[in-house]
Image (spheres, helix red, strand yellow):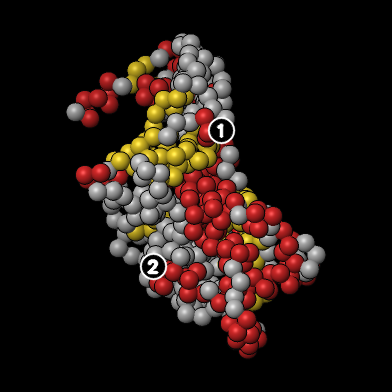
């Protein structure tokens, strides 16, 4: 069937045949609201061939169609975290007109028995729209909607970590501290079917790590188009993405989101992951957030979480940072248990990590659990970097726990004295 369909979807469009190559390339621009396409009212004709053969696909035409001149209706892609706590699911629905705020959107539901989130006999899970973003895939006024998940009775289901995070971030004490998060999301690209990193010889290994970090060149950098397409798609969507870089292990990349305030950090990371998964789907490449995709002398993938409160950013902030580090040291095991599945394979003490069993901190030291930048030390204020979270961590869990441990939680006096002694020994 597929073979019969493909040729039928192509057609010769005479007007396009005459377009110079440059115009055809410009026609590939994503989502400019341009109405320069010829032959059809408001449709943009896009050449798929790099040659000026004039072959276009109607599929591309339909996918790139700007519907705004014809209807007020928009498509909203409702997105939620599935039953594993790391998988993303989504489905789409028509909304009667463009919206500015998630409160204008209806609640919706899905079959939780198909996502491992509800028993078959009572399978309805309710989606509550919480944050909206522009949809870089459909363009126009279409949107991506970050949702969280509830039982019909209005109870958050166990995988709904956003609900608890939203509580923490609406606590007046936390609100007054305006917590900022800058999250460094690392990820690995795999060749489909063989599940082996992009750029690696199938059944073999590339040369040892060293030349790949922030590298250029076809023998050192693998998957840049994916990283770049993702970067622009995130900017378009309204995600607070702040940069990207190629990573130490070939086929591994990083992007940073933030600083974002409170619950926004989690929403932005989840939507950025959704966009990445959609782009890798288009590219026929597999995205993995496994914290240690390849055993051996290869870097793992983390999600360093840079964090500050208002008092840390103000004069005298370094003292506040040290107190936060003390609190973090006292709850090391709790934080580790919330920082991602399989993190013990990554936090070995090698490859710019600290051992999972010991809490440590230091200035400019990448082998510590918590790193404080030179700049922060020099200025006496700034932020800390929690290097422990794995790339597959849930940002709602990690950000909320950081705020809770450093703003809301108070250790007992004895624990504090004990820990202070332990820390003093280590520093
Ligand atoms: P690294 O040197 O560890 O690779 P990156 O440059 O990748 O660091 O990421 C640092 C992150 O910290 C960025 O997302 C940045 O926005 C964020 N950041 C900067 N200042 C603060 C701050 N005061 N509080 C929280 N995050 C911050
Ligand atoms: Mn980084
Ligand atoms: Mn990194
Ligand atoms: Mn870092």
Secondary structure state at the residue bearing disc 2: loop
In-image side of 336 versus 408 (left or right): left
Query: Sequence order check: which comes first, mark 1 or mark 2?
Result: 1
Foreground residue among 140 and 307: 307
Foreground residue among 244 and 256: 256
Residue 101 marker? 1
In-image side of 89 versus 334 (left or right): left
Give the quarter of the figure containing the N terminus. Answer: top left
Does 207 sit above or below residue 277?
A: below
Residue 47 can be seen, yes or no: no
Foreground residue among 282 and 302: 302
Residue 342 marker? 2
Residue 293 location (% of width, % of height): 38, 64
Residue 283 location (% of width, % of height): 40, 43
Residue 223 can be seen, yes or no: yes
Residue at point 50%, 18% (across, down) = 72
In-image side of 358 versus 190 (left or right): right
Query: Which label lies toward us, 1 or 2?
Result: 1
Residue at point 46%, 11% (across, down) = 40
């Amino acid at each position: 069937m597929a073979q019969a369909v493909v040729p039928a979807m192509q057609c010769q469009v005479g007007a396009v045949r005459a377009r110079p190559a440059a115009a055809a390339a410009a026609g590939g621009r994503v989502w400019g609201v341009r109405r320069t396409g010829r032959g059809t009212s408001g449709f943009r004709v896009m050449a798929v061939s790099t040659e000026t053969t004039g072959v276009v696909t109607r599929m591309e035409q339909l996918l790139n169609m700007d519907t705004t001149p014809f209807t007020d209706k928009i498509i909203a892609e409702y997105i939620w975290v599935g039953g594993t706590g790391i998988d993303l699911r989504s489905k789409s629905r028509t909304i009667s007109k463009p919206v500015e705020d998630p409160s204008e959107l209806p609640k919706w539901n899905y079959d939780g028995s198909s996502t491992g989130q509800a028993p078959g006999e009572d399978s309805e899970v309710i989606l509550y729209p919480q944050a909206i973003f522009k949809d870089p895939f459909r363009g126009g006024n279409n949107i991506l909607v970050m949702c969280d998940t509830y039982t019909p009775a209005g109870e958050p289901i166990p995988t709904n970590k956003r609900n608890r995070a939203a509580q923490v971030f609406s606590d007046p004490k936390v609100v007054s501290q305006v917590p900022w998060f800058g999250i460094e999301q690392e990820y690995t690209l795999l060749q489909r079917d063989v599940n082996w990193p992009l750029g690696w010889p199938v059944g073999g290994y590339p040369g040892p790590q060293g030349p790949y970090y922030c590298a250029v060149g076809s023998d050192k950098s693998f998957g840049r188009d994916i990283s770049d397409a993702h970067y622009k798609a995130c900017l378009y969507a309204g995600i607070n993405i702040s940069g990207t870089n190629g990573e130490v292990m070939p086929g591994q990349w990083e992007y940073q989101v933030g600083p974002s305030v409170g619950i926004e950090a989690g929403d932005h990371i989840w939507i950025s992951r959704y966009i990445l998964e959609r782009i890798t789907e288009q590219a026929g490449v597999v995205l993995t957030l496994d914290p240690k995709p390849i055993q051996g002398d290869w870097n793992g993938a983390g999600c360093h979480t840079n964090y500050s409160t208002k008092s840390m950013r103000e004069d005298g902030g370094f003292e506040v940072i040290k107190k936060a580090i003390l609190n973090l040291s006292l709850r090391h095991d709790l934080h580790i248990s919330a920082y991602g599945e399989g993190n013990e394979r990554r936090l070995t003490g090698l490859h710019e990590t600290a051992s999972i069993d010991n809490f440590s901190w230091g200035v400019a030291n990448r082998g510590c659990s918590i790193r404080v930048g030179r700049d922060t030390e020099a200025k006496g204020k700034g932020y800390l970097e929690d290097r422990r979270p794995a790339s597959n961590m849930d940002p709602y869990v990690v950000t909320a726990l950081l705020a809770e441990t450093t703003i809301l939680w108070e250790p007992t006096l004895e624990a504090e004295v004990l820990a202070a002694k332990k820390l003093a020994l280590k520093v």
